Image (tube, helix red, strand yellow):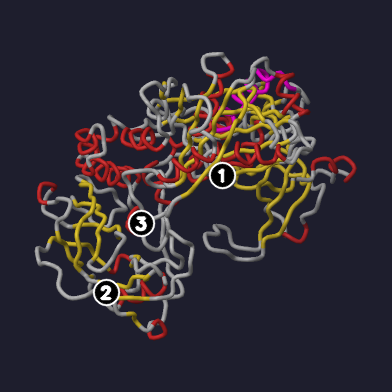
Amino acid sequence: MVGRFLAGLRDRRVFGARARDGRVIVPPLDADPRTGETLDVLVEVGQFGIVTSWTWVPEPRPNHPLQRPFAFALILLDGADTAILHVLDAPDASSVRTGMRVRIRWRAEREGSIRDIECFEPNPEPARGQYGVQPVDVDSIAPLSQIVTPVRLDYTVNPGRATARFLNAIAQRRIIGQRCPACRKVYVPPRGSCPTCAVASDEEVEVAATGTVTSFCIVRVPYPGQTIRPPYCSASILLDGADIPFLHLVSDIPVDDVRMGLRVEAAWAPDAELGPTVESIRWFRPSGEPDVPFEQIKEHLV
Amino acid sequence: MRDVAVVSFAKAELIGGDNTRNEVEILMPVVHEAIERAGIDKREIGFTCSGSCDYLQGQPFAFVTALDAIGAWPPIEESHVEMDAAWALYEAWVRLQHGDIDSALVYGFGKPSLGSLPDVFVAQLDPYYLQPLWPDAHSLAALQARALAESGVAPDARSATAVSTVPTALQSEGVAPITDGAAAVVLAAGDVAQRLSPRPAWIAGVDHRSEPHHPGMRDLTRSASAELAAERAGAFAGAPIEVAELHAQYAHEEAILRSALRLGAGVRVNPSGGALAANPVMATGLIRIGEAAQRVIDGEATRALAHAASGPCLQQNLVCVLEARA
């Protein structure tokens, strides 16, 4: 029913679902919200209706459909028994009231979306004709099978106390971890707690910018948003002085030569590119020291 | 049914947000406090259940990193709901009914200060009819406020209308402030509850009910689901409710809930200040249960009601009745 409703909008038609007790549900659902029964009778309702509740939005948010003051409204279309939520384009709040008649303003380009209805607009014409009565041949309306509803949300990220100190230090080419007061393990990057012991970790420890590859994978598959050209190596690196490996890139070595036990050192970004980000280390590169035997790293693989 | 009680409660409510600590740094002291107050050995806890929503902090799998605050080693039996932690408490209560474990830890946390909360709530709406129009939480609430005001049912129609005509005023009046925070509750069954607490807050009944998602498909002036949940939780039978904690994020929601839950003039409503005083989203509902339980534990009340809500315009409601027993 949802797909047929959206397909109908593309053709400037508004469908509802008629329940067994005669109520017409607009916009239609696949099941009667009151009884749970499957809804399969499609009817066409009017393009005029009345406002049953509304709220004025004097300052539209960036995501709102109208970028001038408008009203969100619940609108009971002629022939419908439930209200549809949409936006109402009116000159000001004083021109809107519950019970006023409104009509659909269609978007010129329609694609099968609730936003094919650009908005509603005030219209004093009384209801005419019979709506929501005559069933529409369901098979004559090909339902839309897929829609895209993009969502954009913005966040100001707060790393927390421990991670903030780590990020500030890495901007100065120093790597800071925290030691758990209970198990004495050193975590890099620190999160302010030991996840095994569930206690706060506040003893700060500086670790070396050298370490050992304990595990790795070669990324050969491109994906959207990828910033590095494959193939490249992503590795778990146990920094000297830390107990938990740290995820970073390994480069300056053919990917097929990367191995567990490989000794590496940080390749720092130039001064101008240093900042509170792990990208202050461009990648890790072989240090030239002999490999570490597996026995010494087997407790630190990931 | 197996008797289950709230034996301890702890919370952190950071009005205006906490811009220095991450969610683990906020949550850990709260969990520690609840466990300490319960006087239970952490290793004895049979089940852990949490409620949170990754959209709040915009961090995928934030609910997994939050386990750092619990210490999931050696491995623990654990579950999560992408809802207010009041529903995690419901899951833990059901889990305790199985009879093979005697205690559970429930916690919830949220950091809504990192995003735009009225917009984040849009992400919970259906993607076909509602989400593309971006009806922010304040606007949906205002539609309900007007419906209530114009129905003549509202005890204070004037303030509800003010809410609906000037959404920006919602920020200061009749709206919960942005709050980061966390809450934790320890549940225990039967003898274990009696061992841990001299006066446990026994869960006499708990139930949750939902209504149609679309605000245009229900009567916005009342809350049929809150009323049904209260009835099924036994709130309308037995000794009178003395204290109620309501998860009302707007002033008009409290009016609707007082009516649905049949709270008369003799009931103390929201002695904690309620969600309008502090609203750490995803912990707010659990805090209502914790606060109501605390009134019983402290001997201030013999029978208390806690309410939690979820979804647009009070779509889903949970009611928990707590009582002291001789």
Q: Which mark is residue B217?
A: 3
**Element type at mark 3:** helix
The chain under label 1 reads: A
In the image, the segment drawn in magenta is B22-40
Q: Looking at the picture, which amino acid does disc 2 mark?
A: Glu
The answer, for residue B240, to whether it is visible in the render is yes
Residue depicted at 56% across the width and 23% down the height: B293
Q: Which mark is residue B266?
A: none
In percent of width and height, residue A86 lies at: 27, 58
Res B78 quadrant in image: top right
From the viewer's perspective, tell me whether residue A138 is left or right of residue A256.
left
The chain under label 3 reads: B
The chain under label 2 reads: A
**Sooner in the amino-acid sequence: mark 1 or mark 2:** 2
Asked if marks 1 and 3 touch (Cβ < 8 Å), the reply is no
Q: Nearer the viewer, mark 1 or mark 2?
A: 2
In percent of width and height, residue A141 lies at: 38, 82
Q: Identify the residue under disc 1.
A: A279
From the viewer's perspective, tell me whether residue B214 is left or right of residue B171.
right
